[in-house]
Image (cartoon, rainbow, N blue to C red):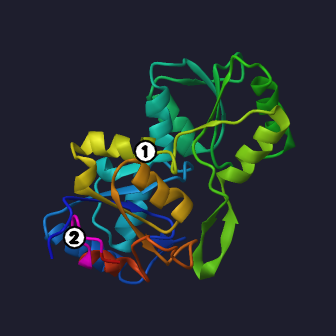
Amino acid sequence: MKPYPLYIFDMDGTLFRGDEALPRAVDTVAALRDAGSRVCYVTNNSTRPPEAYVQKLSRMGFPVRRAEVYSSALATAECLRGQVARAHVVGEEGLTSALEAAGIAISDVDPEVVVVGLCRTFDYDRLTRAMRHLLDPSVRFVATNRDAAFPLEGGRLIPGAGAIVAALAVCSGREPEVVGKPSPYLIQWILREEGMAPADALVVGDRVETDMVAGQRAGCAVHLVLTGVTTAAPAGVPWSPDLSGVLTREPGADAT
């Protein structure tokens, strides 16, 4: 097998569900590394800082370095870097710490942008405060992602950031700029950081409407696994029941 130079792996539903590594996932990633490929880990989940994902992946047995972890929170901070000074945030530590590291202050006073991600303490008060800012048309509305749900152990799903983004879109009458998948921004940023062309990378994930679309919009080959949210592959999308299927994919090949 001739491997891709770079594999961009979604995490939730692709490598693990909750705190459990998915079958054959650890061995597959190790085999690709042994073959000389580079690996990046990417997630639309904005709740955790990258160090938390390093710990989680390492605990499960995945080989990982801090520089290989990318998230919608980090991409959102990169997208806004140098453009705004103050942000009202509906989100958790992963998002606030990324914005602060990019020199953006977290403030409820005269924010230039409302940034929304998954927020498990979201309530009516937070909805009201964010809506008030968004009623000012000069304040930008940016979402880390619009995922409706994400997978946990035992086949369970819980609400994603998209549910919160939808509530704010309805009450403010506005639609957000979306940084995470299916926008190509996150994948394109990874390619720039890794010094790779789109043809050098295979984007692997468990969601057609986010992972596959983002990869295709960025000009990359894609591969769907049926271990997370998507349970049946649409026509024309290369797929496999689990992650080991990527071991038979070669650059330029159309095999599913």
Q: CA distance from mark 2 to mark 1?
A: 23 Å
Amino acid type assigned to the residue bearing label 1 in the image = Leu
* Magenta segment: 248-254
Q: Is residue 193 above or below residue 44?
A: above
Magenta span: chief secondary structure? loop
Name the residue: 75% across, 46% down.
166
Spot occupied by residue 195 in the image (x, y as percentages of width and height): 21, 42
User: In the depicted view, which residue is nearer to us: 223 or 75?
Assistant: 223
Q: Is residue 233 above or below residue 209?
A: below
Name the residue: 64% across, 42% down.
91
Spot occupied by residue 111 in the image (x, y as percentages of width and height): 67, 20
Q: Which residue is mark 1?
A: 186
Q: Residues within 10 Å of mark 1 (few under 14, many from 20)?
A: many
In the picture, the quarter occupied by the C terminus is: bottom left
Assess whether residue 250 is covered by the magenta stretch. yes
Name the residue: 59% across, 47% down.
145
